[in-house]
Every structure is written in C-alpha cells, then in structure tokens.
Amino acid sequence: MRLNHEDLAMKTVELQQYKRRLLDLRARLRTNEYRSIDAALEDARPPGEHENPLPPSESLDKETTLEFAEHDLHQAVSAALERIERGTYGVCETCGREIPPERLAVVPYASLCVACERKAETE
C-alpha cells in the first residue's frame, strides 16, 4: 500500500535530528578528504622518508578506492539533505513507501527501502 505524503510527514523534531546527523556526517567526510590528501602527499615522499612504503601502484589503488567511496557517500548525504528540504526524506524513491525509521537510524542517507535496495543490488 502506498502512503500519501501527509501520512509520511515526519515530526519536525525527528527531521531536525536526521538533518543534524547528516550535517555532522558531511563535516566528518570533509575532514577525511583533507586527511586523504595528506596521506597521498605522505605516500609521494621518496622511499628513504618512509619506514615501510607501499608500492606506488598499491598505494594509489587504495587511495583511489577510498576517494570513490567517500565521494559516493558525500553525494548520498547531500542528496538526503536535499530530500529533507523538498519534504521527501524518508520516502523510498522507487516505490514511494515509507523507509522504516530503523533503517534511517542505521543509514540516515538511505533513499530506498530495504526491499528496493535489495532489488537494485541484484539487477
């Protein structure tokens, strides 16, 4: 059963709590971006300045993977904040059903309910 937006409207207090969590997460991600840059600069130093340096390709692979994961997470957090502003936060973007509060407590940037997320992962 699809719910209309009035049925899905979160209480202002709950919505502000999610917004605060998302803003905190975005701030931590930005801090981690700077740490990643520092780590990349550290890896670029000549071998004599490291105790056990990673081979350049392994270091680059790890850094690239981390950057992509952080970038994806940053985009998901920003999109969740936009959904809060539009009044669609907590509504599955695929089926239009409510995303359970238990899911949002664990993944506050979730845009899909569990069923739609599973379906998307298998496609």
Image: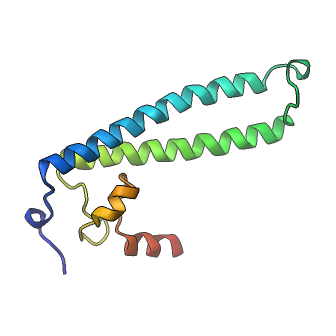
Q: Is residue 123 visible?
A: no
Colouring scheme applied when the structure was drawn: rainbow
Image location of residue 95, percent across then percent down? 28, 72
Report the residue that reaches farthest toward the right: 48
State the residue in front, 64 or 101: 101
Give residue 50's quadrant in the image: top right
State the residue in front, 13 or 60: 13
Q: Is residue 98 above or below residue 20?
A: below
- In the image, what residue occupies the spot 43% across and 44% down? 75
Give residue 40's quadrant in the image: top right
Q: Is residue 117 above or below residue 41?
A: below
- In the image, what residue occupies the spot 78% across and 23% down? 44
Report the residue that reaches farthest toward the bottom: 1
Image location of residue 39, percent across then percent down? 69, 27
Image location of residue 110, percent across then percent down? 37, 57
Q: Is residue 37 visible?
A: yes
- In the image, what residue occupies the spot 50% across and 47% down? 72
* Quadrant holding the N terminus: bottom left
Judge from the rendering whether residue 6 lies leftward or rightward of residue 103; answer left or right. Answer: left
Image location of residue 80, percent across then percent down? 32, 48
Give residue 94's quadrant in the image: bottom left
Judge from the rendering whether residue 82 lies leftward or rightward of residue 25; answer left or right. Answer: left
Q: Is residue 41 above or below residue 79?
A: above
- Tell how many labels: 0
- In the image, what residue occupies the spot 35% across and 52% down? 108
Report the residue that reaches farthest toward the left: 6
